[in-house]
Amino acid sequence: MNTFDLETKDRIEAIAKNDALKTSAGNFMKASLQPQYSYNFRWLGRPIIQYPQDIIAMQELIWRIKPDLIVETGIAHGGSVVFHASMMALLEKCGDIKKGHVVAVDIDIRAHNKAEIENHPLASYITMIQGSSVDNDVIEKVKSIARGYSRILVSLDSNHTHAHVLGELEAYAPLVTPESYCVVFDTIIEDMPEDLFPDRPWGRGNNPKTAVWQYLNSHPEFEIDRCIQDKLLITVAPDGYLKRIA
């Protein structure tokens, strides 16, 4: 670890103890969710619907891990899919992987979004599967594709109920290779006021974070990498960056 990395580690550890700064970040998260702050960003032309901090964190993970396959649940407008595809292209260009690919699953891939993704310059890196991410046939399709790859990262961002995310974790987290990550988005729901999600089937006590906690109780091969959330401060995935350690 070089000097700058050591200094960065010290800064992050100090931030983790800075209650005033963490409170300010939490207040921003609460204030920014209802106005849909994350809906204002694009990646290579496609709406990505993520906080910029989490995009940067994913870029850092992908560059460090150098996966040749990313499995993603939740497509929406396709920004995250295109982002992951662009990282595959960069890793190929730099000679870090031979051939990278992204498998993305969504229960309802809207026709206009599908067309935009299929017409994107990075479309050759992407396979889209329409269906529930916890449907057995869909799971088997993803597993079949995954058999041809050696380093796998998983990103879960579809239905945010406890039962659904727990089902996704049981299905896809085992695909994650050691030292790689399963990233579970929108764990922030557990930390937000109940009235922020009045028309949603999820809320406090029933969300991705509660699913993560339950999954980890019986899966010691994963641990929460809290260094990431301490660094970001502003993230929709607190306790959601899961590193496979065994």
Image: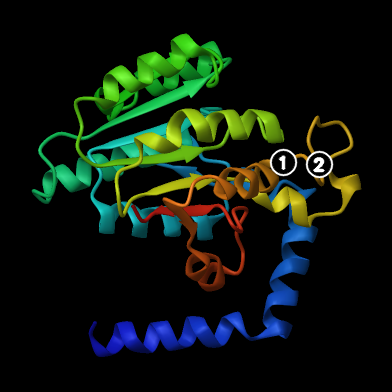
| Contact, mark 2 vs mark 1 (Cβ under 8 Å) | yes
Residue 211 against residue 228 in the figure, above or below: above
Quadrant assignment for the N terminus: bottom left
Residue 45 visible in the displayed image: no
**What residue appears at the point 31 percent right and 51 percent down from the top-left corner?**
62
Left or right side of 168 for 102: left
**What residue appears at the point 12 percent right and 45 percent down from the top-left corner?**
93
Where does the image place residue 115, in percent across and percent down from the top left? Answer: 43, 15
Give the residue type at disc 1: Asn
Q: Residues within 10 Å of mark 2 (few under 14, many from 20)?
A: many
- Tag on residue 188? none
Where does the image place residue 160, in percent across and percent down from the top left? Answer: 68, 35
Give the residue type at disc 2: Gly
Left or right side of 211 for 125: left
Numbered disc 2: secondary structure: loop
Considering depth in this image, is 218 or 236 the residue closer to the camera? 218
Q: CA distance from mark 2 to mark 1?
A: 6 Å
Residue 137 visible in the displayed image: yes
Q: Residues within 10 Å of mark 1 (few under 14, many from 20)?
A: many
**What residue appears at the point 42 percent right and 26 percent down from the top-left corner?**
104
Numbered disc 1: secondary structure: loop
**What residue appears at the point 33 percent right and 52 percent down from the top-left corner?**
246
Residue picked out by circle 1: 207
Residue 217 against residue 3 in the figure, above or below: above
Residue picked out by circle 2: 203
Residue 207 against residue 12 in the figure, above or below: above
